[in-house]
């Protein structure tokens, strides 16, 4: 297991390098630079700025300079948030995105699995159809429609929850963003669970257990749940990616200073270092997470471990 | 219920719940220590400042924060008058080239150090120093040697600024600059603490290291979220500062900011979403503050290429056919003024000139325009086809669509709309290769007509149309040499007349500042520069 | 071709397929015909009629937007563009994915392992970021949106096609063809590809909603389809700003968008039930 993990990690390095090169080229290919603004600057000042930030060096030189910094753990200063380094910005923003994402994922798993299992047990009943209809809606309505509507309803009209982020403390300000983020995933996981659970409930060993007189709940708990979870586990990869994407929207709407928001801002501002830093950070994270998912897969299904 | 049964039974679910609880607890932040009676003002800011180093920032938002934590030689009072800041008195020589400032004895930094003339001299040198790469280095360009220093031809030590003693600063100029005093209220001219820079280097801007000589000091900065300021007890005018703490909340989306305001979470917004204006006017009209602002929104022509090169009638025709009233009523709808001048109204000591057709009805204008465009050689069988570029934003889009429709209807012009991202538009506008008509704007830096007129001088980097008129330039030169303010004003007004008649741009409307100000806030004064110092405000419970 | 007639028969027997397929077809029909029969043009602004509510008067059944343009026509245009983008992007991802998967599955062995490892690592990348970067780098064109979205979506298809190809390869008729010396290319295109048809169709209808959501999201950020073109995502984005004053600007395009997505989801599910009896785990 350890050897497998190490090998996979090593294999990820060339990918990461490729990612860095690609992102670097793309960001620099974008027309306009990090210091452009409505007011055009006199040429001498532009020259001074270019020199101070090494933008007048040829591209390969800039790349080498950047890469050697990265290897030392220094992601550079942000070109836009000039009083902060990229590592600092990521360090501030990521825990927030992580919290939001983790809570959304947790909520999605709990509610989704429960709802899906319930629907599977009560297959073809009214409850089942209702659950599936709701889940279909959850998948179909985009996050950026749900989020503003919820703010309007719960924060402005009813004033039950805070409308935004900064200056508010406590759990309340997490509620709306997490729900917005979780909704599509709840829907999808419920669907997956139901389908998978139906399959498993129809399989021989479950039927045997039922035949032996085991109640429905016990059957699920001791026999059906684990194997039914396999498709959910494979979905975890895309689920994380979906939460990543959704978080950009949610962060925009609620003004959460998370990583997604910083990335979009950075791309639009041509904040080269910030953009590159976030891309590298996320790529590394996802590679590690995939590794974890793989290992978990092996834990849950011993057959795979044999491979 | 299956779920409850599962929750009760399953060991794994118990673990899951534990994790959920853990995450929840971790996310509960410590409550902010609201001691007794600390009055806190909550303001909305549309984007993070790039920096709180006065020399490394240039955005309007950075200026807003800097005005709370710093102070220059001069400042503005609550009623919008130019008053002394760190300087309590000053004299100007007869030829207008030498300014002598007497600094206050009680001006202090937030660690108790006195603010000295040498601090200012150091800061001005740093502003001009090419190694600092300050954006607004040019602002003090009329000070002796500053331009040469920026170009690297002279050392920063050679700047025409001298600290005669701890309390006296002498500034020497190349040419008379009547608006110098207004310039010295700008945050780029605020002093920095030399000792801090020596000790911390680039990290001197961090909360905790940063020393401020203004009414507040920076306690904390969460990028993308909020900047927290608190009272600077060493500020010379601290007794007059009513509010103890100020939080500048970074709220990039206007709708989100509006919702925060309506939920009672912020006292002052940085802006107001145009789509909600109707509603706000009926909901809370007294809280809406809309005032003229020193900025002009315009469409520029690329004068280096056909069809607009050397073709003033064509440009005039297009300018006439725009119904500016419709634009400000239907498109922007915030109480902006349609622009028939280049310099906005409300500028000190100035009366803007107007376009010749300012007082005609739109139908009359359209008729004139049709004649002009025919003379230029275009007609129904040879319609003018042009490209209009603007940057990605709802309002710009609506503006462009409206004007496209107006030109089509009145003149049969076929306009292709090209929407570009801001950086791209800027790059194209500067390159002058592909642009024909482009959207642009200019915000004044100080309260003098010069800040608008000088960008149209040939060779000025902000001269996007590449307007080059000898007559205009010579008029501006004459104005620059005038010490007498009334005579100077005449030259400037004449220059504007020439500019307008040449139509290098289509001024569309003048900006307004728009804020929602809670009834709890007292002391808010609308002014044309949109400067609102937190130290002039106070909060009442209501 | 018996493959096709067999497929058609199976399709027609599923109620979900018929209903959602029918609704989609109806939407496409209205989207194309609607603007043609309406007296309004999607570009035409009318400043006297800004933000008017839906009414039968003046044939403006969906009301007007903030520039006085008729919302019905704009929504239909938006639907056209949305569906177009989604379909073309999905076809792009389909072509890439199918080719990639077929080659990997057929050749097998080392090559397959490397190719699938590549797919796995690509899966790891924060593609949304690259899409945003791409949109920012180039002048935003419809073509680029297709490519960007297609480039993100082909991974799933590749995996599935590879799986299918692997199992098909072991079947007798393929073995027979190989033994008789038919060239690999021929085998792939004559024998394997037609048998992939069902699975491919099923999964394409699942990538289409992803493409639609991605395009809508780009429009929300201001990076997607540009004026005067519009898409349902762009309309929804504009509608969010008018949520309180003119709710129809949000509700109508959002409802249509949701309906289209739901149909594709139902369709995809049903098609999968019909074609892929071995559920992909």
Image (tube, grey):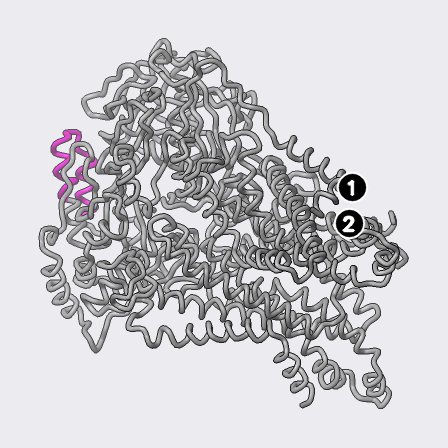
Measuring 30% from the left and 47% from the top, which residue is drawn there?
Answer: B441
Residue A206 shown left or right of residue B177 in the figure? right
**Label drawn at residue A217:** 2
Question: Circle 2 sits in a helix, a strand or a loop, which is it?
Answer: helix
Q: Are marks 2 and 1 on the same chain?
A: no
Residue B535 to residue A259: above or below: above
Query: Is the stretch drawn in magenta largely helix, strand or loop?
Result: helix
Q: Which residue is under mark 1? A: B9
Q: Position of residue A274 (x, y in %)?
A: 57, 43
Residue A31 relative to residue B318: left or right: right
Q: Is residue B334 something one can see in this rendering?
A: yes
Q: Residue at x 12, y 34 (%)?
A: B487
Question: Which is more toward the observer, B13 or C45?
Answer: B13
User: Which residue is found at the position 23% from the left and 24% from the top?
Assistant: B81
Residue stretch in magenta: B472-494
Q: Is residue A109 left or right of residue C262?
A: right
Give the x, y percent position of residue A13. 74, 51
From the top left corner, tell me how far across and down residue C278 is, in percent. 76, 70
Q: Nearer the viewer, residue A68 or B520?
A: B520
Q: CA distance from mark 2 to mark 1?
A: 9 Å
Q: Chain of mark 2?
A: A
Chain identifier of the residue bearing label 1 in the image: B
Residue with the most extreme front position: A213
Total number of numbered discs in the rendering: 2
Q: Where is residue A129 shown, x and y percent of the image?
A: 61, 60
| Residue B165 appears in the picture as rendered | no
Judge by depth and name the residue closer to the eye, C54 or B153: C54
Q: Quick check: marks 2 and 1 in contact, CB under 8 Å?
A: yes
């Amino acid at each position: 297991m350890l050897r497998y993990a190490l090998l996979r990690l090593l294999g990820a390095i060339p990918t990461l390098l490729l990612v860095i090169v690609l992102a670097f080229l793309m960001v620099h290919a974008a027309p306009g630079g990090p210091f452009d603004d409505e007011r055009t600057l006199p040429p001498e000042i532009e020259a001074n700025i270019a020199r101070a930030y090494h933008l007048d060096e040829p591209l390969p030189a800039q790349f080498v300079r950047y890469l050697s910094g990265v290897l030392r753990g220094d992601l550079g200063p942000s070109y836009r948030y000039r009083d902060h380094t990229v590592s600092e910005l990521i360090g501030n923003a990521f825990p927030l995105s992580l919290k939001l994402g983790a809570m959304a994922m947790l909520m999605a798993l709990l509610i989704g699995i429960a709802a899906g299992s319930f629907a599977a047990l009560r297959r073809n009943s009214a409850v089942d159809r209702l659950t599936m209809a709701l889940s279909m809606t959850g998948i179909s309505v985009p996050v950026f429609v749900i989020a503003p509507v919820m703010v309007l309803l719960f924060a402005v009209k009813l004033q039950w929850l805070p409308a935004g982020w900064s200056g508010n403390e406590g759990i309340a300000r997490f509620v709306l963003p997490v729900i917005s983020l979780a909704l599509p995933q709840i829907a999808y996981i419920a669907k997956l669970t139901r389908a998978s659970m139906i399959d498993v409930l129809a399989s021989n060993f479950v039927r045997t257990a039922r035949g032996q007189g085991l109640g429905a709940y016990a059957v699920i708990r001791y026999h059906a749940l684990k194997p039914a979870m396999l498709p959910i586990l494979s979905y975890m990869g895309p689920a994380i990616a979906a939460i990543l994407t959704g978080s950009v929207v949610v962060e925009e709407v609620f003004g959460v200073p998370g990583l997604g928001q910083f990335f979009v801002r950075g791309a639009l501002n041509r904040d080269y270092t910030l953009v590159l830093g976030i891309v590298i950070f996320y790529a590394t994270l996802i590679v590690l997470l995939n590794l974890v998912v793989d290992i978990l897969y092996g834990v849950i299904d011993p057959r795979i471990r044999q491979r | 219920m299956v779920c409850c049964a599962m929750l009760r039974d399953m060991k794994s679910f118990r673990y899951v719940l534990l994790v959920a609880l853990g995450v929840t607890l971790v996310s509960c932040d410590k409550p902010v220590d609201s001691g007794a009676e600390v009055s806190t003002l909550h303001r909305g800011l549309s984007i993070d400042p790039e920096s709180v180093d006065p020399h490394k920032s240039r955005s309007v938002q950075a200026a807003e924060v800097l005005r709370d934590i710093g102070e220059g030689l001069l400042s503005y009072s609550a009623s919008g008058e130019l008053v002394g800041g760190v300087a309590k008195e000053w004299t100007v020589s007869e030829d207008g080239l030498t300014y002598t400032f007497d600094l206050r004895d009680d001006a202090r930094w937030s660690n108790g150090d006195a603010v000295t003339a040498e601090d200012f001299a150091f800061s001005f040198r740093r502003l001009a120093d090419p190694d600092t790469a300050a954006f607004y280095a040019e602002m003090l360009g009329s000070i002796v040697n500053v331009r040469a220093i920026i170009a690297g031809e002279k050392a920063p030590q050679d700047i025409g600024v001298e600290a005669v003693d701890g309390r006296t600063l002498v500034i020497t100029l190349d040419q008379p600059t009547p608006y110098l005093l207004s310039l010295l209220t700008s945050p780029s001219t605020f002093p920095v603490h030399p000792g801090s820079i020596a000790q911390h280097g680039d990290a001197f801007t961090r909360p905790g290291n940063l020393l401020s000589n203004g009414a507040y000091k920076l306690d904390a900065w969460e990028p993308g979220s909020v900047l927290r300021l608190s009272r600077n007890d060493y500020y010379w005018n601290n007794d007059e500062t009513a509010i103890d703490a100020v939080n500048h909340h970074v709220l990039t989306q206007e709708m989100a900011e509006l919702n925060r305001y309506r939920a009672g979470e912020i006292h002052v917004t940085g802006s107001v979403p145009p789509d909600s204006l109707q509603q706000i006017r009926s909901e809370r009209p007294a809280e809406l503050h809309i005032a003229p602002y020193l900025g002009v929104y315009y469409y520029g022509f690329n004068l280096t290429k056909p069809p607009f090169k050397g073709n003033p009638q064509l440009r005039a025709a297009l300018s006439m056919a725009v119904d500016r009233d419709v634009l400000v009523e239907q498109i922007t709808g915030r109480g902006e003024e349609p622009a028939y001048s280049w310099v906005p109204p409300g500028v000190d000591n100035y009366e803007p000139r107007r376009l010749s057709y300012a007082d005609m009805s739109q139908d009359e204008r359209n008729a004139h325009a049709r004649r002009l465009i025919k003379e230029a050689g275009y007609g129904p069988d040879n319609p003018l086809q042009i490209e209009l570029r603007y940057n990605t934003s709802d309002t710009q889009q609506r503006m462009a669509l409206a004007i496209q429709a107006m030109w089509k209807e009145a003149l049969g012009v076929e306009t292709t709309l090209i929407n570009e991202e801001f950086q791209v538009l800027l790059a194209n506008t500067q390159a002058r290769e592909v642009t024909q008509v482009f959207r642009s704007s200019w915000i004044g830096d100080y309260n003098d007509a010069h800040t608008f007129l000088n960008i149209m001088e040939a060779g000025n980097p902000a001269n996007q149309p590449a307007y080059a008129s000898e007559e205009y330039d010579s008029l501006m030169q004459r104005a620059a040499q005038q010490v007498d303010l009334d005579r100077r004003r005449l030259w400037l007004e004449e220059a504007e007349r020439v500019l307008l008649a040449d139509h290098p741009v289509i001024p569309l409307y003048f900006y307004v500042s728009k804020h929602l100000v809670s009834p709890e806030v007292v002391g808010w004064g609308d002014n044309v520069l949109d400067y609102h110092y937190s130290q002039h405000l106070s909060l009442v419970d209501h | 071709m018996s493959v096709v007639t067999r497929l058609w028969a199976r399709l027609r027997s599923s109620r979900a397929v018929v209903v959602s397929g029918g609704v989609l077809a109806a939407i496409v029909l209205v989207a194309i015909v609607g603007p043609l029969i309406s007296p309004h043009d999607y570009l035409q602004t009318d400043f006297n009629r800004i933000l008017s509510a839906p009414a039968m008067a003046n044939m403006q059944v969906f009301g007007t937007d903030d520039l006085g343009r008729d919302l019905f026509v704009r929504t239909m245009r938006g639907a056209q563009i949305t569906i177009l983008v989604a379909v073309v992007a999905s076809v792009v991802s389909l072509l890439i994915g199918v080719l990639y998967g077929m080659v990997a599955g057929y050749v097998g062995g080392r090559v397959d392992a490397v190719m699938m490892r590549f797919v796995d690592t690509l899966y790891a990348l924060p593609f949304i970021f690259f899409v945003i970067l791409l949109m920012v780098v180039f002048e935003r064109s419809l073509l680029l949106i297709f490519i960007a979205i297609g480039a993100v979506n082909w991974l799933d298809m590749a995996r599935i096609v590879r799986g299918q190809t692997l199992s098909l390869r072991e079947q007798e008729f393929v073995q027979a063809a190989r033994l008789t010396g038919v060239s690999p290319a021929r085998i792939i295109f004559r024998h394997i590809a037609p048998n992939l048809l069902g699975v491919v169709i099923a999964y394409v209808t699942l990538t289409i909603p992803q493409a639609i959501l991605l395009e809508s999201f780009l429009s929300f950020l201001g990076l997607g389809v540009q004026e005067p073109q519009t898409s349902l995502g762009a309309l929804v984005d504009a509608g969010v700003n008018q949520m309180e004053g003119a709710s129809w600007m949000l509700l109508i395009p959002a409802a249509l968008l949701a309906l289209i997505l739901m149909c594709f989801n139902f369709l995809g599910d049903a098609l999968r039930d019909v074609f892929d009896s071995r559920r992909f785990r």
